Amino acid sequence: MTVSIPVPKADVLTVPIPALRASCAACSMHQLCLPMGLDSNDMSRLDAIIGRRRKVARDGHLYRMGDPFTTLYAIRLGHFKTFQINVGGEQQITGFQMAGELLGMDAISAERHHCSAVALEDSEVCEIPFTRLEDLFGQIPTLLHHFHRMMSQEITREQSVMLLLGNMRAGQRFAAFLVNLGARYAARGYSASSFQLRMSREEIGNYLGLTIESISRLLSRFKKQGLLRVSNREIEILDLDRLKAMAAGTETCD
Amino acid sequence: MTVSIPVPKADVLTVPIPALRASCAACSMHQLCLPMGLDSNDMSRLDAIIGRRRKVARDGHLYRMGDPFTTLYAIRLGHFKTFQINVGGEQQITGFQMAGELLGMDAISAERHHCSAVALEDSEVCEIPFTRLEDLFGQIPTLLHHFHRMMSQEITREQSVMLLLGNMRAGQRFAAFLVNLGARYAARGYSASSFQLRMSREEIGNYLGLTIESISRLLSRFKKQGLLRVSNREIEILDLDRLKAMAAGTETCD
DNA sequence: CGGTGAATTGAAGACGCTCAATACACGTGG
DNA sequence: CCACGTGTATTGAGCGTCTTCAATTCACCG
């Protein structure tokens, strides 16, 4: 299939090449991502330090646990999972990340990556060299403040997962997982109730501290209860309120 | 009871009162805490913004979930627990903090505290007004960098707890917990193998996603296996290597 | 159309939970 | 000093949830 793309006129063509190569202003994620709240002047200063866009093919590593840390990554497009490997060689997935989210913040303290990041589909990231970003912090307080908010948000996200793993039953965990995914898609302008899972049942189970079989059974049960419509990795939430109530613990999961 | 305190001589007396009230240089935690790596000049600039020291009695709240966020807290003395409350009213403890550690970083993103902090014993903290700290960041890059390291460390700490809750068995979790506590005491110049638990069995269980009964049984088992000597909250680790091996999953817990 | 990897479903078992009884530590008052 | 009460911890018995193991089924692709 071919599509004819309208050729931009005069003024647009005068945009310098480097700005085309990596421009936060032109990126649909700039209201969620690091440049949030910056004026166009500051935004182009941020553009100036962003090294390049990097494509990561499905199942490709963005970085590996133990790699030396030099850059943060902002996801432009696609989905990732981050995971740790324990001594026995089994992985524990610590998060699923989507466009607009920042990867690599866990590596700042030890200057080595504490987990690995792998693309769940063909994806694209912006490389942000950390020392150059630190230089900018001194000049753009708004940027610094928002960076702190993003790190803080990562901390609260992980605390919520601890709550989930520490005292929710299986059904509650899975309900919370689906509601969370939906909310994040909604923040990106997509449907909160209808989306495609980018990860396998096994990866979901690993993340939620459950087995693949449990996830499969839960999907079947939710389907039977009229909560979901499921077809392979396609999810449609039919009763978001009840799912939220289950996640909150207000409603039991029978 | 009265105690006669030796009166300091000449030069010491010239130290201005504010410096006496809150001086990082004089604090035994300054090599672990926020001022790590600062020269004495920068350290006193940090001193200048630290509001006051605040005492928190045992079981007292330092802050509550939902409170508006204005300041970070550095623990000078004592121990805290942080926890979330879910809709059903039950708590999930997300961490135990000790001297030299920073509290409140989770609140930056929403400008409200995401969890509550309660003192496990009579404790003392330094109040660090966050906006004034942000002002300092522009002037002291070393301070900023170390602050990022501390936030990043909090992220990796929580990732390790996710690993623990997500795919360790009960014995492994508890072994990891004890080893972690010992390591943190060692970093503060105390024994890694002999210390007092500041939290109840119930709190340990809550943190590890287990019940109080399970913790009690594990203590008995570890005692029987010659791993520990236990007397109330007094712990002596008799075989640290084996405990570490259990935490790593190298050695089974029978 | 057959092969491969993923997902579903069922049956049995284990791990940790719940419930309950008892023991212990510690503080208070007789 | 002991009696008593309260909160915490220990220990046991039975049960439930989720796991493990195994057998199909399904989707996708050469």
Image (cartoon, coloured by chain):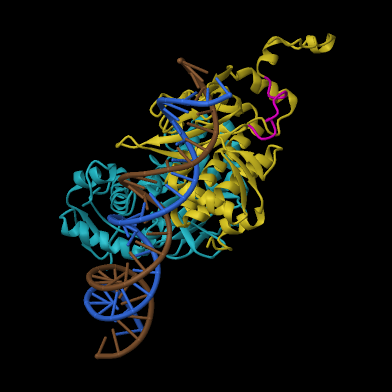
Chain colours: A cyan, B yellow, C brown, D blue
Relative height, residue A207 to residue B7 (above, below): below
Res A33 seen here: no
Relative height, residue D21 to residue B19 (above, below): below
**Closer to the camera, A164 or A13?**
A164
| Residue at the image position 19 percent from the left and 45 percent from the top | A242
Where residue C10 appears, as percent x and y from the top left, is 23, 72
| Residue at the image position 20 percent from the left and 43 percent from the top | A241
Whether the magenta-drawn stretch holds residue B25 is answered as yes
Res B251 seen here: yes
Where residue A244 appears, as percent x and y from the top left, is 24, 44
Where residue A74 appears, as percent x and y from the top left, is 47, 48
Q: Is residue A102 shown left or right of residue A8?
A: right
| Residue at the image position 55 percent from the left and 63 percent from the top | B252
Where residue B130 appears, as percent x and y from the top left, is 52, 25
Q: Which image quarter holds the N terminus of chain B? A: top right
Q: Report the span colored magenta.
A: B23-33
